[in-house]
Image (cartoon, coloured by chain):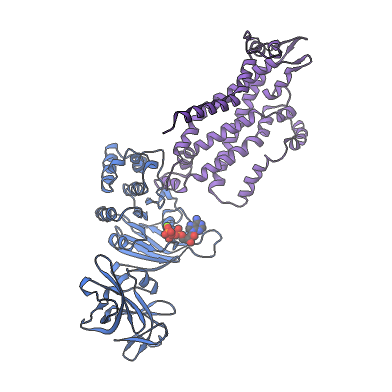
Chain colours: A blue, B purple
Amino acid sequence: MSTLILDDVSKIYGKDTRRSVDGVSMSIKDGEIIALLGSSGCGKTSTLRMIAGFEDVTSGTIRIGDKVVNDLKPSERDVAMAFEGYALYPPLRVRENIAFSLLKNRTPRAEIDKRVGAVSDMLEIGPLLDKYPPSLSGGQQQRVSLARAMVRNASAFLLDEPMSQLEPQLRALLRARIKDHMTAHRMTTVIVTHDQTEAIALSDRVAVMDKGLLQQFGTPDDLRERPANLFVASFIGEPPMNIFPGARTENGVVVLNERGEAAFGIAGATGGLSAHDGLHVGIRPHRIHVGGGVPGAETVQGEVLSSHWLGDHSHIGLSVGGCFLIAVGDRDATPPAGSVVPVSIPRDAVHLFDSASGAAIQHGL
Amino acid sequence: MQSPAFRVVRALLLLLIGIFFLFPIVWVLLMSFMTNVDILRSPPSPFFVPTLRNYVALISGHLSTSSGEVQIDYMHNLLNSVILSTCSVIVSLILGVPAAYAFARFKFRGGEDMAFTLLSFRFAPPLLVLLPLLGYFQAIGLYDTYFGLIWVYQLITLPLVLWITRGYFEDVSEDLELAYRLDGHSWLSTFFRISIPLARPGIAAAGLLSFIFAWNNFIFALILGSSSVQPVTVGALAFITASGIEYGQIAAALVLSVIPTLILAIFTQRYLVEGLSLGAIKG
Ligand SMILES: Nc1ncnc2c1ncn2[C@@H]1O[C@H](COP(=O)(O)OP(=O)(O)OP(=O)(O)O)[C@@H](O)[C@H]1O
Ligand SMILES: [Mg+2]
């Protein structure tokens, strides 16, 4: 319902010297849903808490709509939040917990009932409305907490790991419903999550954080096809990207194995490369084709070391010139361990990174 | 399933424990309806003619002993006890609960030291403080006043209130308060509408406990006041008369002095139990 702009926002707690959030800038459009992704302790909750006004911003500005909110109290910012720890009020029934914020705004009773009913149906907590929070399971409490945030008409919604306690089926179901609801109501939303699938399914853009730094902020496609640096490349995707040290040659790059010997080369244009001797080469497992025969791809010989069938695809471990490579294959394309097979690496699936800074140099050869 | 034998043994054991703890109370209750002669009879007999004269004497203030009539003002002492204990606890709650909240929520310079200093009031022998205080109190006119006594009573009640409720505030998740504030409420209304109600069992326990401690205090008023402000604990000294100890009247006085605390305990119990049922806050 409003834009949300973070401009060079940092947080240093107390006497810490380390920045828990370090110069994060993000511009979130009106009605846009973004996911904040990152490992534990990287500053996701801290970022949300600064937006909500629970923590002072050490430096930088936060704007909601066209207002700078740095010095506004939480009560004046008009944001709704679902807390990582649920924060339900134990003496009140679920229904009252959800309706709590609406009561303050003197919303008519019928309207409150309607909205509480709608949001609790959406989150499958209708039958729990007359219970008390302490008698609910963790996953139920979590949905009540999510309902309490979503029932509001706020400028921005901050959801801190809103579905971490739910089983996969329910999560998938709710994910779709929540997404529809948020789109329909044009809710500007920041969702914190550990789950990439969830981040990609729910959000328009994903912000990847590490050690307080924003590593990349882009669409799921950007993160997958054009990772900004080695961290994003190895963080996004399951299984993670194959990353090896490499070196430039006259007509492409060469991948080095553990002993520093050339394992295999990939021919292609490396026009932008000149002074880069410290180079890392990344190849997405999903793009590697075991069996060869892909036109326009670099084909090398690899020995199959292992293969794990995971229900709908398999992870194939390959040794190519002493490099351990993971590829994703489907059922028919899973060769037995020990066999030597051609392995195709499409040129546009190769990413080059600067070894020293980790920054991406080139996507596709 | 529990076997019948087990249940019988358990009932017997409970009875034994009950008798052990309740016997003194029952005995005092019986004594309060006896004359001194009945009490001192040897061997003691549970059969006697109950009499109300102990109570009558206490309430009317005329104590008849073997060596003549003595005036005692026990009812006034009782009133003093009520005034001193109630006011001390109220003052402590007003000062201590917000302070406890501050100590629990905010980390500020010297916070721990301040909290500990308040607790350390409980370590020092009271006389150490009282004798010098007597000099001050006489100099500034606080000697023998309710105000002065309620002030020093804070040494007993304030640390209790502070340390007990602080623990309860620490158990209330800060996110609960933050969630309420996000809904558009001020810091102050969050304190009164969320934090206080959730810490109510702790506040009730602290109030009750500090009331009991204040009620049982003896030495403060003995030194810092005269009979006009002295509570029952000091007033009971009057029963040690020249002609001996008036056991019957002491017993009756005890029974009377227990009543206010008992009423308060029953009243507070509701909140204490509420605390137990709210204890299971997950997440
Ligand atoms: N109140 C605080 N005081 C001091 N340091 C804090 C405080 N809150 C968080 N931190 C520090 O800030 C860093 C980021 O914490 P934050 O809670 O934002 O992580 P997160 O990304 O939400 O992690 P998780 O995924 O585990 O929830 C951590 O290193 C943490 O130790
Ligand atoms: Mg967190």
Q: For residue A44, say whether it is visible.
A: no
Image location (x, y in percent) of residue A70: 45, 56
**Above or below, comparing residue B56 to residue B213 in the picture:** above
Quarter occupied by the N terminus of chain A: bottom left
Q: Residue furthest bottom?
A: A250
Quarter occupied by the C terminus of chain A: bottom left
**Above or below, comparing residue B66 to residue A95 in the picture:** above
Asked if residue A120 lies left or right of residue B23, the reply is: left
Asked if residue A52 lies left or right of residue A1, the reply is: right
Of residue A117 and residue B244, the one placed in the foreground of this image is B244
Asked if residue A353 lies left or right of residue A117, the reply is: right
Q: Residue at x 37, y 77 (%)?
A: A243
Please state the quadrant of the image where ligand 2 appears. bottom left
**Above or below, comparing residue A270 to residue B139 in the picture:** below
Image location (x, y in percent) of residue B53: 65, 9
Q: Quadrant of residue A339?
A: bottom left
Q: Quadrant of residue B52?
A: top right
Of residue A111 and residue A191, the one placed in the foreground of this image is A191
Q: Quadrant of residue A248?
A: bottom left
Image location (x, y in percent) of residue A259: 42, 85
Looking at the image, how many numbered discs can be counted on the residues? 0
Q: For residue A295, say whether it is visible.
A: yes
Of residue A208 and residue B180, the one placed in the foreground of this image is A208
Of residue B212 and residue A269, the one placed in the foreground of this image is B212
Image location (x, y in percent) of residue A333: 22, 75
Q: Residue at x 27, y 70 (%)?
A: A314
